[in-house]
Amino acid sequence: MRASSRLRIRLALIQYFPHSNGLALSHQIERTTMRIGKARAPHADAFFYDDYRLPVLVDDLRQAWQAEELRKPLQALLAQDRRGQLLKTLSVWFHAGMRMAPTAKALGIHRNTLD
């Protein structure tokens, strides 16, 4: 997109919601996806809802008490994670669809090491 225009065009690709308020919901999700995407990848031109699904879904909680409750387990993990291994493992686990075998393979360790 950049090569063909001097304008800075950014877009957010989301999913279609067929209910009566689907258009309004799609617009809200598009705006949230764009805001979160720009914050996390400022040089990107396209932001995909599927890439930011969890942050978009919990975005309304960021100022609520629920956000603090959601942070507690992660804060406990980070307090014990001096070298960043636990956070890396957790991230790989989520990217692997929360499945042990693909997680172990991605980390280059034996599956039983994760148990």
Image (cartoon, helix red, strand yellow):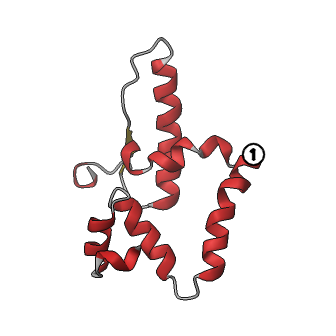
- Residue to which mark 1 is pinned: 64
Amino acid type at image mark 1? Ala
x and y percentages locating residue 31 in the rendered image = 51, 38
SS at circle 1? loop
- Residue at screen point 51% across, 16% down: 21
x and y percentages locating residue 26 in the rendered image = 46, 28
- Of all residues, the one furthest to the right in this rendering is 65
- Residue at screen point 69% across, 51% down: 67
What is the quadrant of residue 97 in the picture?
A: bottom left
- Asked whether, in this view, residue 77 is left or right of residue 67, the answer is left
x and y percentages locating residue 107 in the rendered image = 32, 78
Crowding near pointer 1: few (<14 within 10 Å), some, many (20+)?
A: few
Vertical side of 77 occupied by 109: above or below: below
- Residue at screen point 49% across, 28% down: 27
x and y percentages locating residue 93 in the rendered image = 39, 65
Vertical side of 105 occupied by 72: above or below: above
Residue in the foreground of this view, choosing between 58 and 69: 69
